[in-house]
Amino acid sequence: MKDTVTLNDWVQSVLDEVESALQAWVPMDAPAGLGEAMRYGVLDGGKRLRPLLVLAACEAVGGARAAALRAAVAVELIHAYSLVHDDLPCMDNDVLRRGKPTVHVRYGEAQAMLAGDAMQALAFEVLTPQDGSVEPALQARLCALLARAAGHAGMAGGQAIDLASVGRPLDEAALRDMHRRKTGALLQVSVLMGAACGDAAPAALAALADYGAALGLAFQVVDDILDVTQESHTLGKTAGKDLHDNKPTYVSVLGLDAARRHAAELRDQAQAALARSGLANTARLAALADKVVDRDS
Amino acid sequence: MKDTVTLNDWVQSVLDEVESALQAWVPMDAPAGLGEAMRYGVLDGGKRLRPLLVLAACEAVGGARAAALRAAVAVELIHAYSLVHDDLPCMDNDVLRRGKPTVHVRYGEAQAMLAGDAMQALAFEVLTPQDGSVEPALQARLCALLARAAGHAGMAGGQAIDLASVGRPLDEAALRDMHRRKTGALLQVSVLMGAACGDAAPAALAALADYGAALGLAFQVVDDILDVTQESHTLGKTAGKDLHDNKPTYVSVLGLDAARRHAAELRDQAQAALARSGLANTARLAALADKVVDRDS
């Protein structure tokens, strides 16, 4: 009970810090309504799981917090831009996100596309401050990690597989490959970016990478379970969407019970990786893995 | 005559080098056709003006060529992604680009949007090689420059103004502000990225920034002139498009003759800035400014 309260306090303090940073760094004054659309797409919503992972990983390695906060905001900007683009009519054509009309419903398709584009650029702007607050070599490392996770080999590649898989049966291996890229890459890189802010040994970094991979997949398995077991108002997005769109999911491929068992296995793998890391301060990361699997929205 | 031949030889050698680098760095193996769409959007076409500016500026300051080649490819990827997104139905809805069907005509809207997104990420991937070929501090500097030029304060912001300006009268100052961002920011940053690969004095950098600003605006003025004076088959894109779309242009705001005089003035400003830079090796940059103003496509 004590631990839960402590985690919740820590989560709330991180959420406040990330929200303040987003408020400060996502521009109000970008021209012709672009800033407003960007802010609508990223402020006041979301679980901020990726920022939480960045900052928890940074704590685990005793890393530089100013750099980790920038990494947290950058990865959330990439995540948010991907949702803005994903919701467009030519992609998932979704009208509800985080309990609000999606960006293109509110601002039009063209502005939504531009806002997403500008959010991706802003992520790299946030990672490269010109005020001396982050070592240039660390800036370069964080840009390298994020670009690779967001791009063709990571998130964008996973979305392309997703596009191509509508209405086609995928086996579990193909489904895993898709999600490893589409959602897993960004969740894993959140952990790696946080870890890059400190000086962890290679073995510890490898264990954190395993943790991030297991957690990333667990997140998607649970997402697929919630899509069929929860209502839209609980999720803040349209429930049953994957089923309706005839997209393969862990539930459609494995069945609901096996999907639940798989989520539990992945949680165990994530916790085992933390134990293997040899790092002392992994309680937050452990709690986040539990949170990912036990959540109801 | 000698100089022209020399410039043309240099241009051809740079084009070959940039094309080879794009061939090598834009993936063939990205999943589900994404790599094919990315390659279609950036290979075998375009004037490559931005890469030429990067490498000419690098030569002017005696900079590191390996870094400049990466900067050249990165800025071309940003330019190419912006065209892919700009051509989409929700934006300019254009079907012809570089004499070929646009990416969304060929691969569908969703894949075109993803390809653009992945090309932006790839730009930052190209700037952050993990092989020791570019100093980490220079990697960070190049990412910082490119992210700011591509984002809300630069290219994406200019596109938002462009969207909002359809059918509305703009005065010359507003038109200049739009183009300074929409096309100018990326052209200017090409010069600045090339210069960042060397150790130019602040005064020389400021002069190169002025050169880049004047050249960037000249490019757009000439584009607007060509839009009304050339045929589609010469341009490789739909001629008369801006007029048809009721977009303000330098020709609609100033008239054709005054637009031509303005282009000549901007060329003079660019050349004066080079003279002011105090750099010895600016012949390529000078020739590129002439090429921008004297081109017929």
Image (spheres, coloured by chain):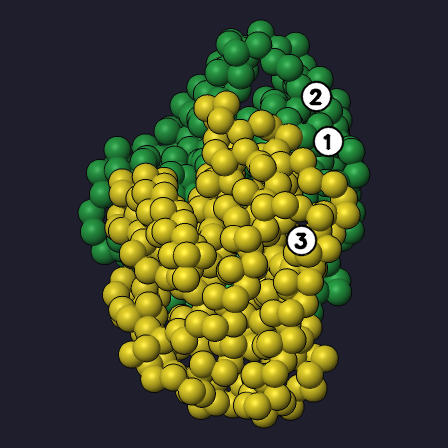
Chain colours: A yellow, B green
Image position, residue B205 (x, y; %): 53, 16
Q: Is residue A23 above or below residue B113?
A: above
Choose mark 1 or mark 2, whichever is in front. Answer: 1
Image position, residue B219 (x, y; %): 47, 37
At x 56% / y 43%, what residue is drawn? A58
At label 1, counting other C-alpha atoms closer than 10 Å, the crowd grade (few under 14, some 14-19, many 20 or more) is some
Checking the image for residue B134, the label placed there is: 1
Q: Which residue is mark 3?
A: A208
Asked if marks 2 and 3 fall on the same chain, the answer is no
At label 3, counting other C-alpha atoms closer than 10 Å, the crowd grade (few under 14, some 14-19, many 20 or more) is many
Choose mark 2 or mark 3, whichever is in front. Answer: 3
At x 55% / y 90%, what residue is drawn? A256
Going from N to C along the chain, the mark reached first, 1 or 2, is 2
Query: Residue B274 versus residue B193: which sits nearer the camera?
Result: B193
Q: Is residue A146 above or below residue B148?
A: below
Q: Which residue is mark 2?
A: B63
How far apart are the alpha carbons under marks 2 and 3?
39 Å
Q: Is residue B269 above or below residue B30?
A: above
